[in-house]
Image (tube, rainbow, N blue to C red):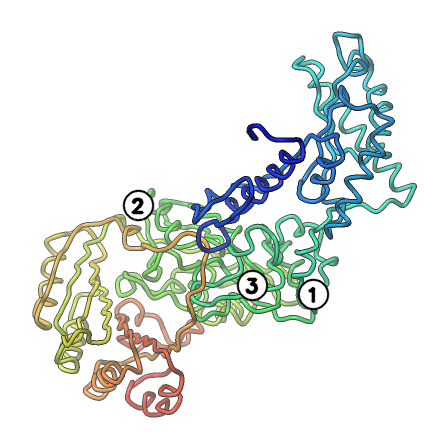
Amino acid sequence: MGGGRRTPGQSVDALSEAIDLIRDVWDTDERGGVRRQGEHYSVHGMKRGPEPAHDIRIWLGAYKPRMLRLVGAKADGWLPSLGYVQPEDLAGLNATIDDSAREHGRDSRQIRRLLNLTGAAFSPASGGFLQGLPEQWVEELLPLVLDHGFATFVLPTDDPRAIDTFGREVAPALREAVERERAGAGTPTGPARPAAALTARRSGIDYDAVPHGLRDTAVEPGDQGFTKVRHGYMQRGRPGLVLRPTAPDQVAEALAYALEQDAPLNVRSGGHGISGRSTNDGGVVLDLGRMNAVEVLDAGSGLVRLGAGARWGEVGSVLHQHGLAISSGDHGGVGVGGLATTGGLGYMSRAHGLTIDRLTAVELVTAAGDQLRVDAEHHPDLFWAVRGAGANFGVVTSVEAVAAPVRDVVLGQFAYDASDTAAFLRTWGEVAEAAPREVTAFLTLGQARGGQGPVAQAMVVFAGDDTDAAVRALEPFLKVGPVLDQRAQVAPYPALLVGHAGPHEGGGTPVARSALLEHVTDESAEAMTRALATGDAYFMQLRQVGGAVNDVAADATAYPHRTAQFSLAAMGRRAEPWTAAGRSWARRRGGST
């Protein structure tokens, strides 16, 4: 980093400012641009990022007191070279770093000690010990580790044989010798956390007891990347600990650990979770997002295995390569674990059923830590329960399902003037129910704006690429009401599953109510119209069910609602109108919440 014409003291101050500026730029968890007014560097709204793919450490090579104190105050590592410092001076230099670290509230173990092995003793050209036996290397390096805390050595050679010998023989032997000596002396080992991170820890959680296999991927407040795992899709959260297992045995460990804590536990399958139950404040979150494998076990039969942490946008893309698809919600950011255990109403439900109707087996971990595979023959009662009420019976880690042979679909998109809302809804219901079962229609309505009546937008999907049949099936939707816009196209099924694939940012959990409707009746149409007109609901969606969904017997799964033709969801900003009108809403909707 160039400092121009500066005194040694000014150069140290400039470097100190530069370190702060670099860290600010890397900190993409913070909102807004970087603003700093320094003596040497000033920025005003500098864009943050790009975010480092991993935690980048700042190491300083330093020998003078002011630079050593800067290492202790701000650096992640100290990297001197033996060509510039004598071994007998290392203790004093380390002490200066340690004293500065303590003065700045840091644990000195946060500062990694690295060493360039330069100088005559290590130089092959001068016949140094790099020409000797591996045992000699260990003998020379061991005191540098035990007495001075060096954990990384940089070799002064490009000789492939020396590098290979060091990696294969010296490094393992040196590690064993260090572990043996430290164990014998009772020297504590392990990573040190910054004071700010320790301060951010929440009460009720025993952080030191986190299972060993989960420690490296666990995220706490104060860790880099905490913002990426703290929120749900709509709910903002601040959990005390996020555990990210990669296998069922780690899920069992995480559950056992979490149940011992005096803190709430929430499970996140990886998707967006509108209910807000995938995060919390001060508790433990079990995040299955790393268990996201998508496997096609048998393309001929459509048998697939899906990790609970996968998102349906990814699932759709992988299955499409094999000419397969599973009806799976309307958003690519939905997680497999949540949808595949509670229902799974999607754009092809009338043609191919709910997501749960396609399941052939489920793997889960119970609260007792048992890892089970359930299907029609193994634990059939549990297999029945997890299809519709899965979140109540364990943590689902993967599912097996039979995908349908669907590659492309025909998508019709319509916009209507829904000023006469009740009449429009009644006609919509009649046309949608009369459509062939290859058709599944979703209708979305919002509040009127700018003195204009409400506009209704529809996604009508024909599950197949027979364009002639699709045109005949979609034409009746042009007669539902005044059409403001229309278009139709053949599209790959995954193209329908648009959605945010990145981390959730939490947008505020809305007040939401849902219902299942046998039909769109006069009463239910009036109730929906009134909710929009009064502002109790600012968003309403009517999803079509029926068809293959209703072919399944009511007692075949824990989802018994096999007579409904529509699923209604409404969102508002205030709970009071919904609470006060709850019974009235229940009477008018013609179904159950």
- Residue in the foreground of this view, choosing between 212 and 555: 212
Q: Position of residue 315 (x, y in %)?
A: 39, 50
Q: Residues within 10 Å of mark 1 (few under 14, many from 20)?
A: many
> Residue visible at 44% across and 46% down?
46
- Residue in the foreground of this view, choosing between 454 and 593: 454
Identify the amino acid type marked 2.
Gly
In the image: residue 569, left or right of residue 84: left
Q: Residues within 10 Å of mark 3 (few under 14, many from 20)?
A: many
- Which image quarter is the C terminus in? bottom left
In the image: residue 194, left or right of residue 494: right
Identify the amino acid type marked 3.
Val
- Which image quarter is the N terminus in? top right
The residue at which mark 2 appears reads as 323
The quarter of the displayed image where residue 472 is located: bottom left
The quarter of the displayed image where residue 483 is located: bottom left
Is label 2 or label 1 in front? Answer: 1
Q: Position of residue 277 (x, y in %)?
A: 50, 69
SS class, disc 3: strand
> Residue visible at 17% across and 59% down?
412
**In the rendered structure, which disc, 2 or 3, sits on the residue that comes first in sequence?**
2
141 over 527 or under it: above or below: above
SS class, disc 1: loop
